[in-house]
Image (cartoon, grey):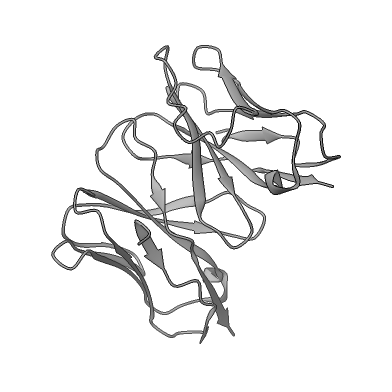
Amino acid sequence: GAGVSQSPSNKVTEKGKDVELRCDPISGHTALYWYRQRLGQGLEFLIYFQGNSAPDKSGLPSDRFSAERTGESVSTLTIQRTQQEDSAVYLCASSPGLNTQYFGPGTRLTVL
Amino acid sequence: QKEVEQDPGPLSVPEGAIVSLNCTYSNSAFQYFMWYRQYSRKGPELLMYTYSSGNKEDGRFTAQVDKSSKYISLFIRDSQPSDSATYLCAMSINQAGTALIFGKGTTLSVSS
């Protein structure tokens, strides 16, 4: 069956521009996570959605980062006024519950 | 002290070798332990999932948890070139709705 998909796969942008990253979770998965992976670093939690509950935004590094999810469908991560330190791979994962998270291939963001 | 420590490697072994990958952690509340495998330019995929202490075996892979020492291991028997990837340990306090805490990953290269 279809896994988690993310788009775009690569994004190059100029410093100061806004970017929007998209995640399509596995159908029926109630939970959705966004992580950031910098080169040579582990995965850094950004935000977590569970059904219609208020999202856990505790990992967002600044107010330039925001994310939305409608119900149990697509999620978008928006980074405003991008900075060079935002360059990383942004990974989305969905889960039917428990700790079994299924990851997408990621969006590689490069801020020039 | 970081919550989860993992030697980044790289670790290079010949085909057929037994590989030992390890993580240490500081938070004694962690109860659920996972190993993810990440191929280059791909998202992580869940390899092993264990609860509390003990061993779990799946084919050539064995996950071991020693909560008293706050130490987890992944053993790969009869390693293959296709095992060449980055291995990330991850752990969480509870089973549902919590973001995982990841190690930085160990890069493994198996030569034929």
The residue lying toward the viewer, choosing from A62 and A49, is: A62
Q: Is residue B70 visible?
A: yes
Q: Which residue appears at 38% of the width and 40% of the height?
A: A100
Q: Which residue appears at 48% of the width and 61% of the height?
A: B104
B40 relative position to B9: left or right: right
A103 relative position to A38: left or right: left
Query: Residue lying furthest left in this view?
Result: B68
Q: Which residue appears at 41% of the width and 79% of the height?
A: B78
x, y percent for residue B83: 52, 70
Q: Quadrant of the C terminus of chain B?
A: bottom right
A18 relative position to A90: left or right: right
Q: Is residue A105 visible?
A: no
The residue lying toward the viewer, choosing from A64 and B52, is: A64
x, y percent for residue B16: 45, 84
Q: Determine which quarter of the picture holds residue B36.
A: bottom left
> Is A110 situated above or below B106?
above
Q: Quadrant of the N terminus of chain B?
A: bottom left
